[in-house]
Image (cartoon, grey):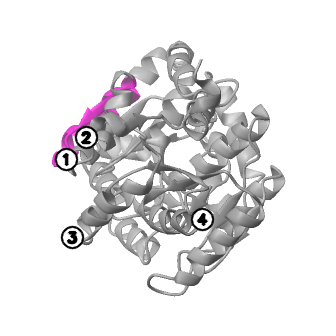
Amino acid sequence: MLTQYLHMGGLERMIFNLSCALKAHGEWDPEVFVFDRIPDAGPENDLGPAFASAGIPVTRFLKPPGFSLRTVLNIRRKLIVEKIPVIHTHDLGALIYGACAKLLTFGRVRLVHTQHSFIHLSRRWIYKYYERFFVRFADELSVVSADTQETYVKLGIPRTRLHIVSNGVRFPEHGAVSADSRRKKRKELLGLLDASTQAALAPFLDCRWLLYMARLHRTKGQDHALELWGQMSPLLRKKSVLLFVGPESEAGRVKQLRSGIASAPDSSRILYLGTTHDPELWLGCADLALSCSEFEGMPLGPIEAAGAGLPLVLSEIPGHEVVKAYSYQYPLGDPAKGARMVEKMMEEIAAGGEDFFNRAWQKGSEVRLRYELTHMSRAYSLLYCPEDHAS
């Protein structure tokens, strides 16, 4: 597995889930090579310890700014010395280095590439030409959704080359369908947090928890969530708490979020609680999951929430189409409509109580089945070594 970063994020969690599933199946022995890091990222955002606990080796190499031939040579050396037959790259940065390393092994390595999103295309015009050029060296190309597939097609990549492989997701074994079970889980969660986070969260044990779980990035919509919060009725805000959970993946985003919180109404009821390696713990405590993202390749957080039996209010974007049946969705330009959807959902929760969450958990079984980890690992095994499955 070749990745640019190994910080807490949807792409990196997918690599972890895939590696664990491949290892458990026994057909492949995955390793990870990571060649960069996000500046100033805290150690709590590093997924390396999770890989170590799972027995999956991680090799790190911090490349200098710009393109690094030394990084290519390090990847090539690892491929040759360890006789690695397949290199699986994730997103454009890894594809560039993986393609160069493959060329230097004279084609002895099979290159499988997964593109998770195309956010980078809006940052630099040249990236679309990089995409068109370097995918030529991939033996297999996969995307995580129909939306990302269409972007590749618009870039001139033949549809026949593209495989859609949905990311596998870890789900809780049981849903928190009663208020008592959610309160119990909240108290358990508090016991796992540091003292300052406990102190901030403890006053809200009996409130409605609106959970916003996503990395902090300009496209992830935390600013839109604050606009929606501001449009909610004061009475509902007094009964609720808005919780942001996720790592900073773009410099300055924590500071910007804290500034936005400070200027929002009922700001004392909005908390940024850092990152987590156990999203299912937060999902078991929440009453509603919220995402106001501007773009998603595959919306990991909403899929996790739907599978956990949580109601969702989401931005109406192509990436959220996969969970449309499990959510209310609103246009990003109309936060008042989003606020009304949250209020309507809260009314349904109050009226339905345990029956509401029990129905949501039962409905979520469709999501849990569709995004089961084994489906993802089997699909990639076919791409890694198709001749073994020709029959």
Say above or below: 178 vs 28: above
For label 4, the residue is 105
Q: Are marks 1 and 2 in contact (CB under 8 Å)?
A: yes
- Taken as a whole, is the magenta stretch helix, strand or loop? helix
Magenta region: which residues? Answer: 326-347
Amino acid type for the residue under numbered disc 2: Glu
Determine whether the residue tagged by mark 3 lies in a helix, strand or loop. Answer: loop
Kindly report which numbered mark, 2 or 4, lies closer to the viewer in this rendering. 4
First reached walking from the N terminus: tag 4 or tag 1: 4
- Left or right: where does residue 239 sit relative to residue 386? left
How far across and how far down the image is residue 360, in percent? 50, 19
Determine which of the numbered discs, if any, sits on residue 125 in the image: 3
First reached walking from the N terminus: tag 4 or tag 3: 4
Q: Are marks 2 and 4 in contact (CB under 8 Å)?
A: no
Please name the residue shown 83% across and 52% down the image.
Answer: 55
Q: CA distance from mark 1 to mark 2?
A: 6 Å
Amino acid type for the residue under numbered disc 4: Thr
- Left or right: where does residue 147 sit relative to residue 98? left
Determine which of the numbered discs, if any, sits on residue 150 in the image: 2
| Residue 15 visible, this angle | yes
Q: Are marks 2 and 3 in contact (CB under 8 Å)?
A: no
Determine whether the residue tagged by mark 4 lies in a helix, strand or loop. Answer: loop
Please name the residue shown 42% across and 50% down the image.
Answer: 115
